[in-house]
Image: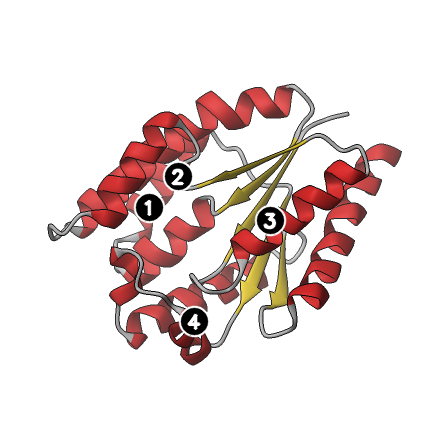
Amino acid sequence: MKGRLITFEGIDGSGKSTQIKLLASELRRRGIDCIETQEPGGTSLGKNLRKVLLETAEEVSSLAELLLFSADRAQHVEVLIKPALEGGKVILSDRFYDSTIAYQCAGRQIPRQIVNYLIEITTSGLKPDLTIFLDLPIQEALRRKKGENRMDFEDIEFYDRVRAAYLEIATNEPTRVKIVSALDSIEVIHSHVLHLVLRLLDKQSTS
């Protein structure tokens, strides 16, 4: 079986990690070999970068933040994602390059040309086979936030730009990016997610 890259996107509080765990459990029950990972932090180097990025008390410039996220992705792609795809595994990643477009380009307002260039060189053109965007109204996202890391303390205008960017990506790439409401119950969201993933894997098995 050819490997597949499935990514989950959304503002923190949308339930990405919960849905990835539920999906992974169900796929394994069906005999499908899958790997759960995240950005930042999907590799040993990435875990250190995650701590630097999210737990530091020091002010981090927008450009430094972008470059650190990019370093994490470069390592993630080369060390984990590419080998796993070559091994026929299904990869479930909590965030990928759409987060960079939403947070660093739209949120931080870094020029798209710079962001696109870094995405291209860190992914070598690799794109997810399916991206699930767990959409959540900003006020609900802020209510759910736990203040666990530096990114949890941005203002509402920042998150408005982030959400708008995600919705624009979904509009521009409707075949790859599927919007799932994060307001539904965990069980209902899991059902939607499982349907989308099994449809992707069924297409693969019949192609």
The three-letter code of the residue at mark 3 reads Ile
Mark 4 and mark 2 residues within 8 Å of each other at the beta carbon: no
- Name the residue at 26% across, 38% down: 68
What's the coloring here?
secondary structure
CA distance for labels 3 and 4 = 18 Å
Residue 183's image quarter?
Answer: bottom right
- Name the residue at 42% across, 61% down: 12
Numbered mark located on residue 119 in the image? 2
The three-letter code of the residue at mark 2 reads Ile
User: Up-down: is 169 above or below 64?
Assistant: below
Answer yes or no: is residue 121 visible: no
- Give the residue at mark 4: 144
Numbered mark located on residue 204 in the image? none
Helix, strand or loop at mark 3: helix
Helix, strand or loop at mark 1: helix
Mark 1 and mark 2 residues within 8 Å of each other at the beta carbon: yes
Residue lying furthest bottom: 139
The three-letter code of the residue at mark 4 reads Arg
CA distance for labels 1 and 2 = 6 Å
Helix, strand or loop at mark 4: helix
Residue 138, image x and y in percent? 42, 76
- Name the residue at 48% across, 77% down: 137
Query: Local crowd at mark 3 within 10 Å, few (<14), some, or many (≥20)?
Result: many
- Give the residue at mark 3: 20
